[in-house]
Amino acid sequence: MLQRHAPEPVYQGKTAGYWIRQLSLPAALTPASELREPPSLHLDTSLTMSASRSHPLEFPAWPPRPETTEHPSVAAIRAMGSAAVPSLLRCLDSHDGQISKNAMRLLGEVCPLNCAVGSALIKRMRVTESSAHKICRLIWAGLPAIVSQHLKKPLSPQPVAARFSDPWFAPAYLCRDALGKMFSLARSIQGTQPEAMAALLTLIRQLSDALAYWEDWVSLLSATTLGASGINAKQALHSLIHELANKGRGLETRVAIAEAIGRIDPASAESLAAIKSVAQETNRVLKCAAIVALGKSGSAGKQTRSLLEQFWHGPDPVLSCLAYEALCRIDPDR
């Protein structure tokens, strides 16, 4: 049997799918007939260079600046509320990359804060190049030029320096951005609507699982999302510490994980031991991230004082400065 979707919600006679597609198009401009002319300027020939004036200078009033209005698509999806969520989730998997991006943006900015939306974003964030696509790409690369020029070139993963044009990383980053907006909004209304944050906290387990994903940037995006959640993501601490110790991870990912631990709970015994171990590795950037994280551990970090003092009195000026700041934070009365 063919799966039938429920009818799409409608706003001003247009379906949710229409408004999702329209988001990437500019909003309608103000008609020329409604534009206001700037005030006319007239030269006062009675002005002189004298220091004394009989009357103050008067300038014509400039028309008030029009208030910025949100894009009609944003207003439409907000008006539809929860009814628009199924359409947005379907658009996440659209073959049209722009429609997928529009759906991600709308999910993060105006959709209800619930577990279903967050789960869909995390699932989409974990989409990487499939084995079948990789085989197709390698076969195309091995074809003679006289043959391959007549075939469409498969999309390819991009290096780190150009990863925002990577066909898999770029959408995943937008999903992470949407998740970050959802958590930020939930924190801002937590005092009056605690159920919103409670719903999103059920996503922490899924983000913890994504930390161990084989693709390095999936782990990176998961770590930054967890770190932005702060103490609310404490249940992910064990997974973060496990991946921090994984030397097979890229440098940027391990730095992001160290920063996330520093935001969530750097004062726990397990966190301190893991961060202290990383601070003694050879990579300078990783040392910097570890020292900063130790500085956030409060009085619990006093047990790392001897290590921080070594960095403080060491030859590296950057590590010395960071270690001094960390010492001042963990023991300000010393």
Image (tube, rainbow, N blue to C red):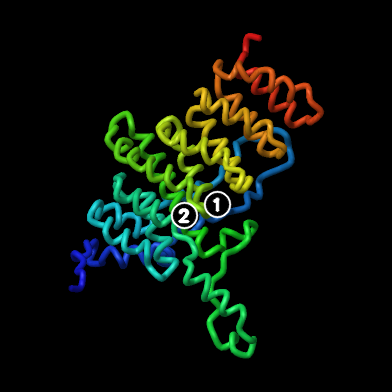
Tell me the crowding category of disc 1: few under 14, some 14 to 19, or many 20 or more residues within 10 angstroms, Cα based.
some
Residue 20 lies, in percent from the top left, at: 35, 63
**Label 1 amino acid?**
Asp
Kindly identify the residue that appears in the image at 48 percent across and 68 percent down.
131
Tell me the crowding category of disc 2: few under 14, some 14 to 19, or many 20 or more residues within 10 angstroms, Cα based.
many
Q: Secondary structure at mark 1?
A: helix
Q: Secondary structure at mark 2?
A: helix
Asked whether, in this view, residue 195 is left or right of residue 109, the answer is left
Residue 232 lies, in percent from the top left, at: 40, 32
The label nearer to you, 2 versus 1, is 1
Q: CA distance from mark 2 to mark 1?
A: 17 Å
Q: Is residue 154 above or below residue 241?
A: below
In front: 269, or 108? 269
Kindly identify the residue that appears in the image at 51 percent across and 27 percent down.
270
Asked whether, in this view, residue 227 is left or right of residue 110, the answer is right
Asked whether, in this view, residue 260 is left or right of residue 252, the answer is left
Kindly identify the residue that appears in the image at 53 percent across and 41 percent down.
243
Residue 321 lies, in percent from the top left, at: 73, 26
In front: 31, or 264? 264
Residue 219 lies, in percent from the top left, at: 51, 48
Res. 70 visible in picture: no
Q: Which of disc 1 and disc 2 is earlier in sequence?
A: 2
Q: Residue furthest right?
A: 315
Reading the image, the residue beneath label 2 is: 174
Q: Which mark is residue 216?
A: 1
In front: 121, or 251? 251
**Label 2 amino acid?**
Leu
